[in-house]
Amino acid sequence: MYIGKTLKKMRKKQGLKLSDLAELTGIQPATLSRIENQKMRGTVESHMKIARALSIDITQLYQAAINEDKEIPDRPQEDAVDIFSPNEKSSYEILTPKVFTKKMLPTLLQVEANGKTNIEQSPAGSEKFIYVLEGDIDIIIEKEKYSLRANHSLYFEASLKHYFINQGAQTAKILCVVTPVTL
């Protein structure tokens, strides 16, 4: 069941910003945003945290959402593309809908000229495959540097600290696939 519309109404009714709710629940703002925009359902545990933060019974959250439970289309609409920008020089576009029902997360990473991503580190056992579509990119994994250009790929343990640097003059585009799905 999608609780997004109900959650958004209840949050706004209490005068809370998304960041306020994130602080009260311990749930990442990006995750709350995805729940509110019906891009993911969340877990019963996250619903319980949300209900506690809003000082309501979880059944109120579900009851109000029952009539609004709609199937998300299998293919996202152009305006429903989920793009996450960890900083002003990089962005990730999630390339599949219903991401939490999948076993892997495909994204398109774009790093602008002279830009870099934030340091990333997925949970233990996570793996990442990257394929450079355009541009040149350096990836730093722990303290090792790998320089890649278009049509190069790399497969590595995503639980190691890593980040991307684009020292080139054009935007680099990289296909990234992570398993299991983590945001």
Image: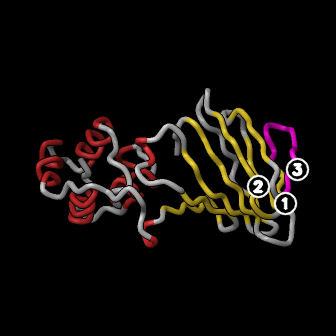
Could you classify mark 1 by the number of other residues whose Cα lies within 10 Å: few (under 14), some (14-19), or many (20 or more)?
many
Q: Within the image, what quadrant is residue 137 found in?
A: bottom right
Q: Earlier in the sequence, mark 1 or mark 3?
A: 1
Give the image location of residue 103, x and y in percent.
50, 37
Give the image location of residue 56, x and y in percent.
16, 47
Decide: marks 1, 2 in contact (CB < 8 A)?
Answer: yes
Give the image location of residue 165, x and y in percent.
80, 56
Foreground disc of the pair 1, 2: 2
Residue tagged by mark 1?
Answer: 136
Residue tagged by mark 2?
Answer: 132
Q: Is residue 50 magenta?
A: no
Q: What residue type is labelled 3?
A: Ser
| Residue displayed at 87% across by 39% down | 144
Q: Tag 1, which secondary structure? A: strand
Decide: marks 1, 3 in contact (CB < 8 A)?
Answer: yes
Q: Within the image, what quadrant is residue 123 found in?
A: top right
Left-right relation of 81 to 165: left
Q: Give the range drawn in magenta.
A: 139-149
Q: Tag 3, which secondary structure? A: strand
Q: In this view, does 125 lie above or below 120?
A: above
